[in-house]
Image: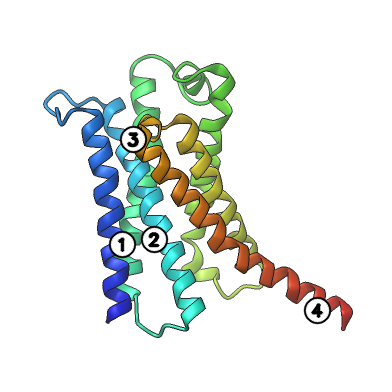
């Protein structure tokens, strides 16, 4: 039960931080909220909640926790799925509605041309995350580990995507928080892939 409480507390905390920095950047004025002002919070929430998935997974592996987190993963997973689809979806629709066409052209007219590839990086990451939803049917396949690995790369790509393009991630104190998320994410991933490399090395030598 304690592990479940920690997981839900972490989700509530990171979500509250995301909502706070987003609301503060708008001075809590939502009466004339545009799509361009709304879609960033979905990206912040998606990344922040997925980040807690990585942390809880790491803690379970490291300390061999047996607490069931089925409900936590299920319900937060639904939130993440909706957020990662709507985050680019709202932007794509609004750019098209405003006469800027479809990506990648609509991206290039929204950000500096030199940074358009970072928006596409986000779109590629979205496709990878959507592919991960197929785990219900394919998680026991031998090739599924490559989908999981691609998801980890996509998570790092989304961190960079948010760091460079996010309005809220350029707020002083939240930029520090965002870097903290990124550093912890890397630290969580290192043992996972270090263990994989060591196992591969052991297989070769034996």
- Name the residue located 81 percent from the left edge and 73 percent from the top edge: 201
Say left or right for 88 vs 11.
right
- Name the residue located 55 percent from the left edge and 69 percent from the top edge: 138
Q: Out of 102 and 157, give the one closest to the viewer.
A: 157
> How far separated are the C-alphas under marks 4 and 2?
32 Å
Residue 196, x across and y down, in percent:
69, 70
Name the residue carrying label 2: 52
> How far separated are the C-alphas under marks 4 and 3?
45 Å
Name the residue carrying label 3: 40
Does label 4 or label 3 sit earlier along the sequence? 3
Does label 2 or label 3 sit earlier along the sequence? 3
Say left or right for 24 vs 44.
left
Q: For the residue labelled by badge 2, is the local secondary structure a helix, a strand or a loop?
A: helix
Say left or right for 77 vs 34.
right
Q: Out of 2 and 53, give the one closest to the viewer.
A: 2
Eyeballing the image, is 126 above or below 68? Answer: above
Name the residue carrying label 4: 202
Name the mark nearer the viewer: 4 or 3.
Answer: 4
Eyeballing the image, is 184 above or below 17? Answer: below
Does label 1 or label 3 sit earlier along the sequence? 1
Contact between marks 2 and 1 (CB within 8 A): the answer is yes
Quadrant placement of the N terminus: bottom left
Q: How many marks?
A: 4
């Amino acid at each position: 039960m304690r592990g479940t409480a920690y997981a839900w507390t972490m989700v509530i905390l990171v979500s509250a931080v995301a909502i706070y920095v987003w609301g503060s950047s708008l001075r809590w004025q939502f009466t004339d909220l545009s799509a361009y002002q709304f879609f960033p919070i979905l990206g912040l929430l998606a990344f922040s909640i997925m980040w807690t998935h990585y942390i809880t997974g790491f803690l379970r592996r490291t300390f061999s926790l047996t607490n069931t987190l089925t409900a936590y993963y299920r319900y937060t997973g639904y939130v993440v799925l909706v957020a990662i689809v709507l985050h680019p979806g709202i932007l794509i629709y609004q750019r098209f509605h405003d006469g800027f066409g479809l990506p990648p052209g609509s991206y290039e007219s929204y950000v500096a041309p030199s940074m358009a590839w970072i928006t596409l990086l986000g779109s590629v990451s979205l496709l990878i995350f959507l592919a991960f939803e197929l785990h219900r049917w394919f998680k026991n396949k031998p090739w599924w580990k490559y989908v999981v690995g691609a998801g980890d790369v996509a998570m790092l790509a989304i961190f960079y995507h948010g760091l460079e393009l996010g309005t809220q991630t350029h707020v002083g104190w939240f930029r520090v928080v965002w870097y903290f998320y990124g550093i912890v994410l890397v630290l969580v991933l290192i043992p996972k892939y270090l263990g994989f490399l060591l196992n591969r090395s052991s297989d070769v030598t034996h």
